[in-house]
């Protein structure tokens, strides 16, 4: 069942959804620069939140030249491209190795566990064949 149109929700709900979308989007953008923080899941969560809270923000995100294709691709195929999976696994492995080298063991294990959980989640998602 599709979500109700954002304008059908009370203002306080739309504001909460829009705020959550903004937090997810900022977190995803930070993930571009921080190796252990994945970008794509946060951008997809931002789109989900914006679709319930702010049509204007959702339109902006969908029209964005770098972030929009991620959301369009997910909505069209409900799958992740193989290349994106490989890149995510590689960056998480490198980030985990770097964390193990530079951080205390207790923190490094926690980060490695989170990365492993994300890797398993990503593995279980359908893989979209490469576009030719």
Image: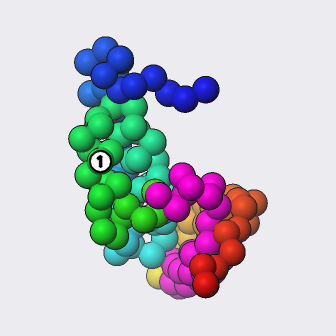
Structural crowding at the residue carrying mark 1, measured as other residues with C-alpha within 10 Å and reported as few (<14), some (14–19) or many (≥20): some
Q: Is residue 43 above or below residue 81?
A: above
Side (left or right) of 83 relative to 6: right
Task: Say if residue 50 shows up in the picture.
Answer: yes
Magenta part of the protein: which range? 72-101
Residue 38 x/y as whole percent: 48, 65
Residue at figure coordinates x 52%, y 62% from the top left: 73
The question of residue 111 being in magenta is answered with no
Residue at figure coordinates x 39%, y 37% from the top left: 51
Farthest residue toward the right? 124
Q: Is residue 43 above or below residue 54?
A: below
Viewer-nearest residue: 62 or 37: 62
Number of labels in the image equals 1
Residue at figure coordinates x 26%, y 18% from the top left: 11
**Residue 48, image quadrant:** top left
Task: Name the residue beneath numbered marker 1.
Answer: 59
Farthest residue toward the top? 10
In the structure shown, which secondary structural element does the residue marked by tag 1 occupy? helix
The question of residue 94 being in magenta is answered with yes
């Amino acid at each position: 069942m599709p979500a109700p149109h954002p304008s059908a929700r009370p203002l306080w709900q739309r504001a909460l959804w829009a705020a959550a979308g903004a937090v997810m989007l900022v977190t995803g953008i930070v993930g571009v620069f921080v190796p252990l923080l994945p970008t794509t899941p946060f951008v997809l969560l931002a789109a989900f939140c914006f679709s319930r809270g702010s049509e204007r923000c959702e339109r902006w995100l969908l029209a964005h030249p770098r972030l929009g294709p991620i959301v369009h691709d997910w909505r069209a195929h409900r799958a992740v491209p193989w290349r994106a999976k490989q890149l995510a696994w590689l960056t998480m492995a490198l980030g985990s190795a770097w964390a193990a080298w530079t951080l205390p063991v207790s923190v490094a294990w926690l980060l490695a566990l989170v990365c492993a959980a994300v890797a398993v989640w990503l593995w279980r998602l359908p893989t979209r064949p490469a576009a030719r």
